[in-house]
Image (cartoon, rainbow, N blue to C red):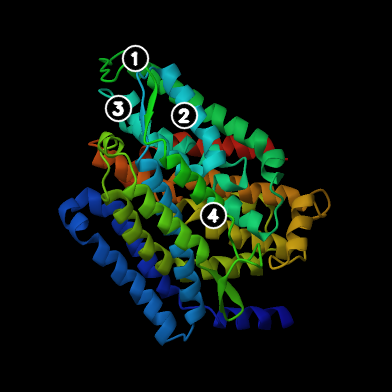
Amino acid sequence: MEALAREKRMTAELPPPALIVPFVLLLGLIAMGPLFFPKVWHSFYPAISLVLGVSVAGYYLGILHDAHRVVHAMSEYVSFIALLTALFFAAGGIFIKVNAKGTAVENVIFLLIGGILANFIGTTGASMLLIHPYIRLNKGHIRPYHIVFFIFVVSNVGGCLKPIGDPPLFLGFLKGVPFFWTFHSLFFHWLVAMTLILAVFYVIDKRDEKTREWAISFPERFEILGARNFVWLAVTNVSVFLDPNLFEWVPSIDYHGSKISFLREAIMFGAAAAAYRTANREALEGNEFSFEPIREVAWLFIGIFLTMIPALQWVSHYAGLRGDILTVHAFYWGTGILSSILDNAPTYLNFLAAGLGKAGLSIESIADVRKFAAGAPMGASESTTTYLIAISVASVFFGAMSYIGNGPNFMVKSIAQHMGIHMPSFLGYVGRYSLPVLLPILTIVWAVFFLR
């Protein structure tokens, strides 16, 4: 009776399920708009995203009198867009000249290097830095699948070995997961996934290679223009660690007990402005630099961050309520599926909180999180480490399942389209690539590492 009363009390505090409709509608429009009414969508998507986001925010502010969640969502959005903006402008001013045919072998090597690099400058930084030379490497024979596999490897799966590699892992680090835990615990998952994805890509690209006509337009050397922008990339990556929840000396805004960061974001926006103002003009022209990709991401994700507030609240509620009966398989697939359609960073945090709750620990305690990562007992034959691995792997890997699963996905798509590549629609990406190619690989990862 006490448990039932607790469940009713917790459910009563939730927003009405109908408030999830704007989020579902926005996802539907992102999927269908470019396919069925492209001119209307491209003209009005900023207004559509903003109206849907404001409608949810307005309900929380005016009806539920819950400003905390809106402020928290907006602070996360500002941090998110600040990082993307800084990396976009810094990497956009670096022009890498590559003189090669873009054979299947060279493409595999390029993607592998990009996946490794993602662990040092983040999936967003690696994506922004390498997408232009990757497209030029395949100039004259670029196909949509080239970009899709770039998203799979460089924008997502490659960056799971270090906390800075992907946003969910960095959030885990801020909560208390040791810095080198990801490398020690996720290396073989990374190795299996990367090997399988690159093997499938090689088979597809090798078959396509026979029909290509090579187009080489650069001198026979490797050259970098705008190398000074690496300084701004470094500034951006260092500033990531200026989190007031990690270091008390970092200034912040105190909002009802929560610390809202602003110094880090100010540095990132400053780095973006400086990177653009001091950029090599030839490098910008070579990259066909345009504001449109970051503009599209900024407008769409403000709607996504606001409309997904009730969706995440319901997910968190259910995970916390049913954590005692959720197995490691449920954590893997639950985190994965929701990371495919929600931003994978907050999904990671919700399931991390649920896993900690299942072990009788708290996400608000760094000591508890470290204990969870170290391997506290969880049932007869499992430890908390297995749950954390499942959450981490699923949030990073499944972030590649759709354009909105991870921040750089949509930006890479937008850049490719701006450069004249006909990218698949939201549903085309999922139906032609994610479900038939990536999902079986992620199922193999689950079977190898989690199925006992």
The answer to whether the residues at label 2 and label 1 have Cβ atoms under 8 Å apart is no
Label annotation for residue 403? none
Residue 98 pos. (x, y %) = 36, 23
Report the amino acid beneath label 3: Ile
- Disc with the residue nearer the chain's start (4 vs 1): 1
Residue labelled with disc 2: 111
* Cα–Cα span, label 4 and label 1: 37 Å
Label annotation for residue 220? 1
**Farthest top residue in view:** 210
Q: Residue at x 46, y 39 (%)?
A: 126
- Disc with the residue nearer the chain's start (3 vs 4): 3
Label annotation for residue 142? 3
Please state, as top left, top right, bottom left or bottom right, where the C terminus lies in the image: top right
The answer to whether the residues at label 3 and label 4 have Cβ atoms under 8 Å apart is no
The answer to whether the residues at label 3 and label 2 have Cβ atoms under 8 Å apart is no
Q: Secondary structure at mark 1?
A: loop
> Can you tell which quarter of the image residue 181 is in?
top right
Left or right: where 233 falls relative to 299: right
Left or right: where 212 falls relative to 179: left
Question: Label 3 neighbourhood size at 10 Å, few (<14), some (14-19), many (20+)?
Answer: some
* Cα–Cα span, label 3 and label 4: 35 Å
